[in-house]
Image: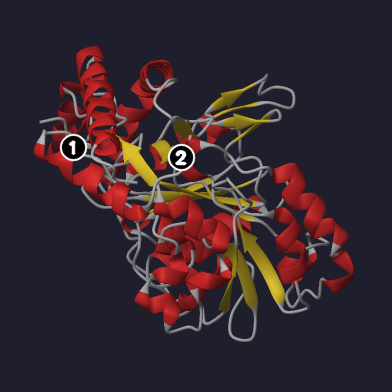
């Protein structure tokens, strides 16, 4: 069996977690704060707030901006629900934008048409680890700056619609000289079990230097993550420091030191893990070059200039000219042969929750076309070179077999 995306846990992670368990600090404590500092250094920002998930990070970002009922927030139709559900959580209205033709990335020409005076943020998606084209995104927002009507002091700082990057996939990526974490006004990362760097469950929020008042923004996120309580357990642990206040009825989405221990150990290995992912992608690209497929480009040009390099998170493959039924049958045959694959993603307008909000898949033809013949191959650091060649061989074998059978 070749699993799709198991966590890469070594003795180093186990030792770090055991050290935490022995320390007496298992909720938010010194290791969470250390992870925040090390992540900020890694992504080149001044502050990082660790949280229970990337979904929580996106919701906190929306609340920092003062977004709520009556407001609109635009995101991609081609993404997981976590990009859009926080918009609903704060009472705002999600507005979906189709992807460009033959692309997994939001169509920035369509984005401009979706901006109204009620638009208070855009959430682009760094799908599969490749950062969105933030230059084109900001150009579209600046072109519609006459429609920008800020409704809070924080929003007014930006002079245009703010950008909250959904960077759940892209920790370690770089584009046009900016690291993931520096391109959006605010950026949310995910450390879920299937992500490149995992804390089992978890996420983080950061913001580009100068976008917000660092201490204010960080303190607000901490308040939101812990019931609005003015002291966390670490602060209350000091002698005589039990007293606290509740600034507002907050939520409960803090990261624990057990999670942070995993993250710290993973972060120390992360550059090597990225290089291994890069090598696996290169092997797939070479092995599938003659397979009649279209693969997402993970690296192009100089990322210090106008190029990009991804975090190599997902191996997205399109079966050119093939139907959804063909894709689904191929997934079944690969599974029976012991190769686990997946699909990223079923567009939001096809899901019940978003249909109930009034979205129709037919209104997003490019997203639908991308989805219908997309298959995601295993891409993780536990794959051996032999495993990768096995996946390539089985993929080509069953694809050719089905085509010989007349399936299309």
Residue 141, image x, y percentages: 79, 59
x, y percent for residue 48: 51, 45
Considering the numbered disc 2 on the image, is that residue within a helix, a strand or a loop? Answer: loop
The residue carrying pointer 1 sits among few (fewer than 14), some (14 to 19) or many (20 or more) residues within 10 Å by Cα, namely some
Residue under the point 40% across and 42% down: 33
Which residue is found at the position 78% from the left and 78% from the top? 117
Image quadrant occupied by the N terminus:
top left
Q: Secondary structure at mark 1?
A: helix
Quadrant of res 197: top left
- Please give the residue where the numbered disc 1 appears in the rendered image: 334
Disc 1 or 2, which lies upstream in sequence? 2
Q: Front-most of 365 and 236? A: 365
Instruction: State the scheme by which the image is colored.
Output: secondary structure
Residue 269 vertical position relative to residue 114 in the rendered view, above or below? above
Q: Is residue 83 left or right of residue 196?
A: right
Residue at image coords 54%, 45%: 126
Q: Nearer the viewer, residue 102 or 166?
A: 102
x%, y% of residue 340? 19, 38
* Residue 213 against residue 17 in the figure, above or below: below
* Vertical order, 77 against 214 (above or below): below
> What is the quadrant of residue 237 in the picture?
bottom left
Which residue matches tag 2? 320
Is there a contact, CB below 8 Å, between mark 1 and mark 2?
no
Q: Position of residue 59 (x, y in %)?
A: 49, 66
Describe residue 107's horizontal placement relative to residue 86 as left or right.
Answer: right
Residue drawn where x is 47% and y is 79% of the image:
248
Camera-near label (1 vs 2) is 2
Q: CA distance from mark 1 to mark 2?
A: 18 Å
């Amino acid at each position: 069996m070749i699993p799709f995306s198991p966590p890469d846990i070594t003795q180093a992670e186990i030792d770090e977690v055991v050290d935490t368990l022995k320390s007496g600090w298992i909720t938010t404590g010194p290791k969470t704060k250390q992870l925040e500092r090390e992540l900020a250094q890694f992504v080149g920002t001044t502050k990082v707030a660790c949280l229970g998930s990337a979904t929580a990070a996106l919701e906190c970002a929306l609340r920092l901006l003062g977004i709520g009922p009556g407001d609109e927030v635009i995101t991609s139709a081609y993404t997981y629900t976590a990009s859009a559900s926080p918009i609903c959580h704060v009472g705002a209205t999600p507005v979906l934008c189709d992807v460009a033709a033959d692309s997994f990335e939001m169509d920035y020409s369509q984005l401009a048409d979706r901006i109204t005076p009620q638009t208070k943020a855009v959430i682009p998606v760094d799908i599969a680890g490749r950062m969105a084209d933030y230059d084109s995104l900001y150009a579209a927002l600046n072109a519609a700056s006459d429609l920008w009507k800020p409704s809070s002091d924080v929003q007014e700082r930006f002079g245009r619609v703010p950008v909250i990057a959904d960077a759940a996939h892209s920790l370690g990526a770089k584009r046009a000289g900016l690291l993931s974490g520096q391109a959006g006004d605010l950026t949310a990362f995910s450390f879920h079990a299937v992500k490149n760097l995992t804390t089992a469950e978890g996420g983080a929020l950061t913001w580009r230097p100068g976008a917000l008042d660092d201490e204010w923004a960080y303190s607000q996120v901490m308040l939101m993550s812990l019931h609005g309580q003015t002291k966390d357990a670490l602060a209350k642990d000091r002698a005589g420091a039990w007293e606290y206040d509740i600034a507002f009825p907050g939520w409960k989405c803090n990261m624990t030191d057990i999670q942070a221990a995993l993250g710290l150990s993973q972060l120390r290995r992360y550059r090597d893990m990225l290089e291994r992912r890069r090598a696996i992608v290169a092997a797939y690209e070479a092995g599938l070059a003659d397979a009649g497929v279209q693969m997402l480009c993970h690296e192009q040009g100089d990322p210090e200039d106008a190029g990009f390099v991804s975090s190599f998170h997902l191996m997205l493959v399109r079966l050119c000219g093939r139907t959804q039924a063909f894709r689904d049958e191929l997934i079944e045959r690969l599974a029976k042969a012991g190769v686990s694959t997946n699909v990223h993603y079923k567009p939001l307008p096809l899901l019940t929750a978003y249909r109930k909000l009034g979205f129709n898949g037919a209104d997003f033809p490019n997203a639908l076309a991308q989805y219908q013949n997309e298959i995601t191959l295993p891409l993780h650091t536990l794959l051996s070179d032999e495993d990768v060649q096995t996946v390539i061989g089985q993929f080509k074998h069953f694809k050719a077999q089905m085509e010989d059978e007349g399936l299309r």
